[in-house]
Image: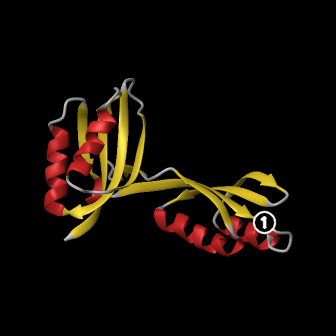
């Protein structure tokens, strides 16, 4: 049965590492739904967060292959972990004079930040989980979406709240 997986991969920050990781997915005809890569707090290392949907056995096989790759430091399938996931979107909305108040009310409800204004459009920055982002997009759609840019998912396990 196919399920959604969020996988975190810590790697050496070197040319070609991302290409080899993505190649494992394309070789198995898997789609990467979301991909985010950035440096970590450790110099010379990056964290790749990818989201995919697939059969559990195949996902586990891919994770084992990641663990055997040169330049891969750590692989964690975060799917079953208690975690925080966020995504950021920039969305440019057509803003006619009569719709501006409603567009801004919706933005306020979602805590969207206005990052650019023109006489005919607003550009918002929205951060949240996938459901929040999608809900904001759907509510803005009737006004006319001019452009969207999304970051993809980033995820981190939650802190252990048990005191010792």
Against 92, residue 41 (above or below) is above
Seen from this angle, which residue lies furthest top?
43
Q: Residue at horizontal 16%, vertical 54%?
A: 60
Q: State left or right for residue 149 relative to residue 54.
A: right
Residue 54 point in image, percent of width and height: 24, 62
Disc 1 target residue = 95
Residue 100 appears in the figure? yes
Q: State left or right for residue 37 relative to residue 59.
A: right
Residue 143 point in image, percent of width and height: 71, 72
Q: Quadrant of the N terminus?
A: bottom left
Q: State left or right for residue 86 relative to residue 67.
A: right
Residue 48 point in image, percent of width and height: 36, 42
Q: Residue at horizontal 27%, vertical 41%?
A: 21
Write down the quadrant of residue 44 in the picture.
top left
Residue 159 appears in the figure? no
Q: Residue at horizontal 47%, vertical 63%?
A: 130
Residue 128 point in image, percent of width and height: 53, 59
Against 76, residue 1 (above or below) is below
């Amino acid at each position: 049965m196919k399920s959604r997986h969020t996988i975190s991969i810590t790697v050496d920050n070197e040319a070609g590492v991302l290409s080899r990781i993505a190649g494992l997915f394309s070789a198995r005809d898997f789609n990467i739904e979301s991909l985010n890569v950035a440096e970590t707090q450790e110099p010379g290392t990056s964290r790749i967060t990818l989201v995919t949907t697939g059969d559990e056995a195949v996902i586990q096989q891919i994770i084992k292959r990641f663990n055997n790759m040169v330049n891969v430091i750590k692989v964690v399938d975060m799917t079953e972990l208690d975690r925080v996931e966020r995504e950021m979107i920039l969305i440019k909305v057509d803003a006619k004079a009569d719709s501006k108040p409603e567009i801004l009310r919706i933005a306020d409800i979602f805590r969207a930040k206005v990052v650019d204004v023109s006489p005919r459009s607003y550009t918002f920055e929205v951060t949240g989980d996938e459901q929040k982002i999608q809900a904001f997009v759907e509510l803005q759609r009737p006004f006319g979406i001019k452009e969207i840019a999304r970051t993809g998912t980033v995820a981190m396990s939650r802190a252990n709240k048990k005191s010792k």
